[in-house]
Image: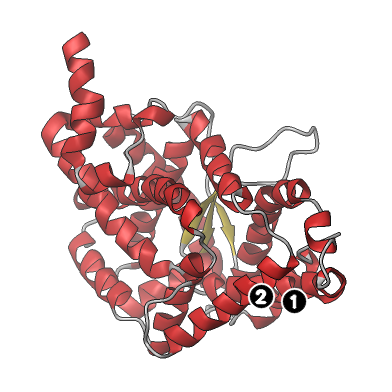
Amino acid sequence: MTVIDWDVAVNTGVRLVRPGPQVDLSDARQAVAQLRELSTVAAGHVREFTGMNPLEPSGPAVIVDRPGWIRANVDGFRVVLEPVLEQMGAERLNNSPAGNLTSAVGSRITGVQLGAVLSYLAGRVLGQYELFLPPDPDGSSPTGRLTLVAPNIVNTERELDVDPRDFRLWVCLHEETHRMQFTATPWLREHVQELMQELLLSTEMDASDLIDRLRQAGEAVADAVRGGEGNLLTAFQTPEQGELMDRITAVMSLAEGHGDYVMDAVGPEVVPSVETIRARFQKRRQAPNPLDRVMRQLLGMDLKMKQYEEGAAFVRQVVAQVGMDDFNKVWASRETLPTLAEIRSPSQWIERVVRPAAITE
């Protein structure tokens, strides 16, 4: 039984997504060519500044439009979710009175919901390191792909009224840092995938659970409309999943904060207008329109904003105290990743990971 109709998800997302900004053909081609070039330039800056080395060659970023981003992300969801759904087993849904209804219409409804969420995000995402890709024709798993969403980058640089080349390089610095994190640390991708799948499998779900959770999601929607703090991440979370969510949040905070730190540290050397860009971008992040505010709460995107801030503060403090080489011990193994408590108290991570190593060396 298919729980999510992936084709419906793609078709819904592509149908609902807003068109990008009006750009004439020559400007569009120039933007695509420049983004490819700047992604390679940024990769060199990131490698030099962080001291990290990718274990495989990485070419220029892949440049996509909004529908292309939606298709890529549906592929990514399939890679993560299909093994989980198979493991859950159809019997969990079929052994209940609601099972037949769920199998008849639920997969299409879920596909529509996923497509609607992706259509919203597709207008806002500037770039992404796609961790989860379908297998290559030979059956091997690709390590990932750096994607830049050209219309969103062009739209944002126009809204902020900033220098286009500077802004594009600044975005590339952040996204290339993500690529470096996962290509220099080969175990990290599998670790994140395992955490996500463990979270999804940590509850025995049957049709009645599914209906209960959809009802909770509806209440979260209503709460957000009323100006509350509900979001779909917490609506779908059981108490037992809290510890797993903390581990995922810690990894994502590290990744996002490290991206922001590198972007801003390298920026002054290579992006002349970086201070203007950062100030205007931060103001834009903090002042969404009412619909954006509601959607961000529902999707847990406010949590992501907090991740950027806490993660960047962690990286800044650790590098200031022990230097970049010792900070890079964070990538050594699963055990050296910070916990959520350590993200919020960097000295705890330093005492646990850096100081013992210094004593034994």
Q: Amino acid at mark 1?
A: Ile
Along the line of sight, which residue is nearer the eye, 278 or 35? 278
Q: Position of residue 167 (x, y in %)?
A: 34, 63
Q: Which residue is labeled 1 in the image?
A: 109
Determine crowd level at label 2: few under 14, some 14-19, many 20+ residues with C-alpha closer than 10 A. some
Instruction: Provide the secondary structure element on which disc 2 rests.
Output: helix
Query: Residue, x 70% and y 80% (percent of image)?
Result: 15
Q: Position of residue 279 (x, y in %)?
A: 21, 69
Tell me the distance, in whole angstroms, between the alpha carbons under discs 2 and 1.
6 Å
Q: Position of residue 108 (x, y in %)?
A: 79, 74
Along the line of sight, which residue is nearer the eye, 20 or 34? 20
> Taking 67 as reference, is 24 above or below it?
below
Q: Is residue 3 left or right of residue 276?
A: right
Which image quadrant for residue 339? top left
Hey, which residue is sitting farthest top in the picture? 361
Q: Amino acid at mark 2?
A: Gln
- Residue 89: which disc? none
Q: Which residue is labeled 2 in the image?
A: 113
Query: Residue, x 29% and y 50% (percent of image)?
Result: 311
Look at the numbered discs 2 and 1 and tell me whether their residues touch, using CB distance below 8 Å: yes
Query: Residue, x 79% and y 51% (percent of image)?
Result: 89
